[in-house]
Amino acid sequence: MMDSLSQIDQLIEAARRHLDGLLALRADMAGEPVPERDAAAADDFAEQNLIDAGTAAQRAGVSKPTIRRWVKDHSIGFKRGGRLLVSVPRLQRHTGDSSL
């Protein structure tokens, strides 16, 4: 069940990225300024926000199995090509530590 929720979260994030692209394209075609996204709506799963599970564990001061559990239970990351990737913004929110 949690794996399905994680997949749904990933699809929602991908849809948001596509929608942002469409909004930017529409604004460009209409000669309007591209709408800004607020910081709260920033894409947590953008490539520049992703780190591997080992790095996430090291930064958070927890074990890799803990990171795997957080990914599964709290949707802080996902698997891509057999690699577990963790969203730094989601890890920060989950741990309450913005310095990670």
Image: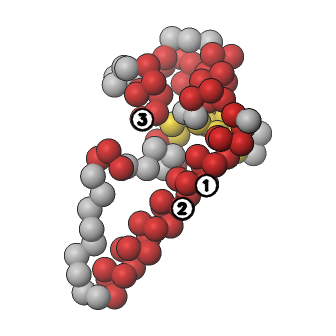
Q: Is the residue under label 1 in contact with that under label 2 (CB below 8 Å)?
A: yes
**Residue 90 in the image: x percent, y percent?**
46, 33
Q: Residue at x 69, y 34 (%)?
A: 2
**Tag on residue 11?**
1
Write the residue at 66% across / 21% down. Answer: 69
* Dots 2, 3 in contact, CB < 8 A: no
The reply to whether residue 22 is in sight is yes
Question: Position of 96 compared to 51: left or right?
Answer: left
Asked which secondary structure carries label 2, the reply is: helix
Q: Which residue is mark 3?
A: 89
Quarter of the image where one finds residue 67: top right
Spatial distance from mark 1 to mark 3, Cα to Cα? Answer: 18 Å
Reading the image, the residue beneath label 2 is: 15
Residue 51 placement (x, y as % from top left):
54, 35
- Location of residue 93 in the rendering, given as x and y in whole percent from the top left corner: 40, 28
Q: Which residue is at the far front?
A: 1
Q: Residue at x 61, y 54 (%)?
A: 11
Amino acid found under the numbered disc labelled 3? Pro
- Crowd class of label 3 (few under 14; some 14 to 19; many from 20; radius 10 Å): some
Secondary structure of residue under mark 1: helix
Q: How is the image coloured?
A: secondary structure
Q: Residue furthest bottom?
A: 30
